[in-house]
Amino acid sequence: MGKCRSHGHSRHGHHKNSCCCSHNNHHGGFYRKFFTAEERIESLKHYKETLENEIKGIEEEIENLKK
């Protein structure tokens, strides 16, 4: 479960299935009525964190390529 946090970026875009949270969000539309608001918030916060890690990794890679 700590997978997404430990390596923030996957160069090959595997983050969709390597992370517990993004799956809920990508396919959450249909099941959303079964979520409580708190669960939904947790899920979204976790997803946001994953995306922020992705962005950080992408920015690092861009910097490395510029050198």
Image (tube, grey):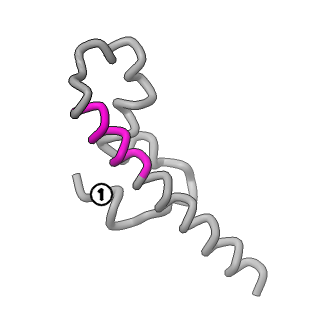
Residue at image coords 35%, 56%: 4
**x and y, in percent, of residue 65 in the image:** 73, 77
> Looking at the rendering, in which quadrant would you find the C terminus?
bottom right
Q: Is residue 45 magenta?
A: yes
Left or right of 32, for residue 26: right
Q: Residues within 10 Å of mark 1 (few under 14, many from 20)?
A: few
Residue sitting at x 49%, y 62%: 9
What residue is disc 1 on?
Answer: 3
Q: Is disc 1 placed on a helix, strand or loop?
A: helix
- Residue 43 occupies quadrant: top left
In the rendered image of this protein, does residue 43 appear above or below residue 11? above
How far across and how far down the image is residue 34, in percent? 23, 15
Q: Where is residue 35 in the image (x, y as percent from the top left)?
A: 24, 22
Of 6 and 51, the residue lying toward us: 51
Residue 11 falls left or right of residue 7: right
Q: In this image, 65 relative to 2: left or right?
A: right
Residue 8 horizontal/vertical position (percent): 43, 64
> Which amino acid type is marked by label 1?
Lys
Magenta includes 46?
A: yes
Residue sticking out furthest to the front: 37
Which residue is found at the position 37% from the left and 40% from the top? 44
Q: Which residue lies furthest to the right in this view?
A: 66
Left or right: 59, with 26 as reference point: right
Magenta stretch, residue numbers: 39-48
Pick the front one: 61 or 41: 41
Query: In terms of image quadrants, where is residue 63?
Result: bottom right
Number of marks:
1
Residue in the foreground of this view, choosing between 20 and 45:
45
